[in-house]
Image (cartoon, rainbow, N blue to C red):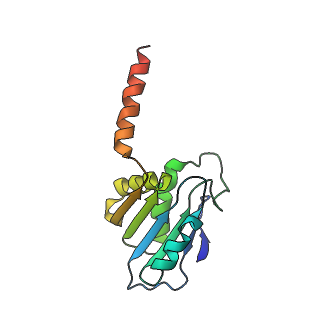
Amino acid sequence: MTGRKLKNSPIVYYINKDVDQNRKWLMFIHAAFVNYEMFNKQIEYFKNSYNIIAVDIIGHGKSLNIIKGDSIDKMSGWMKEMLDKEQVDKVNLLGVSLGAVISQDFANKYPDKVESLACFGGYDVITVIKICKKVLEQLRFL
């Protein structure tokens, strides 16, 4: 895997060395407190069938050069920038835990960029947002 830095962001991501434009793309988004290497076995398994992008999410792995204003909320936009930079039209997304939440957010914001979505150990982002809004409304009356 070859590491690449996304301009104007703290994000570092990795691409397999033998990119074949005839192959579909598979993007791995890791859980909290680890880095892209949590997918080493999966990368090894899929590397001959897919082009691979593995991301170190903000604050993890080598994506540590954070400046004021950078936040996890920007991950989806940065993921789109990665795909645009690498000339990827559609991607198969696989996210675990926090990576599943980020993957869902990306799929909601950029559905035309998503071929498939696999989320493990995550939760429904839309439901959580609705619950948070209800809690905030209730707190206003206290």
Identify the image quadrant of residue 126.
top left
Q: Where 37 falls versus 107 (above or below)?
A: below
Give whichever of 121, 22 is nearer the camera: 121
Give whichever of 24, 46 is nearer the camera: 46
**Quadrant occupied by the C terminus:** top left
**Quadrant occupied by the N terminus:** bottom right
Question: Where is residue 128 drawn, in percent x and y?
Answer: 39, 39
**Residue most extreme to the top:** 142
Question: Where is residue 48 drawn, in percent x and y?
Answer: 46, 84
**Residue 86 visible in the picture:** no
Give whichever of 95, 114 is nearer the camera: 95
Count of residue discs: 0
Q: Which residue: 40% across, 65% down? A: 93
Q: Which residue: 47% across, 53% down? A: 97
Q: Which residue: 36% across, 65% down? A: 113
Question: Where is residue 18 drawn, in percent x and y?
Answer: 52, 86
Q: Where 73 falls versus 4 (above or below)?
A: above
Give whichever of 102, 122 is nearer the camera: 122
Q: Where 112 falls versus 70 (above or below)?
A: below
Question: Where is residue 105 drawn, in percent x and y?
Answer: 40, 52
**Residue 18 visible in the picture:** yes
**Residue most extreme to the right:** 65
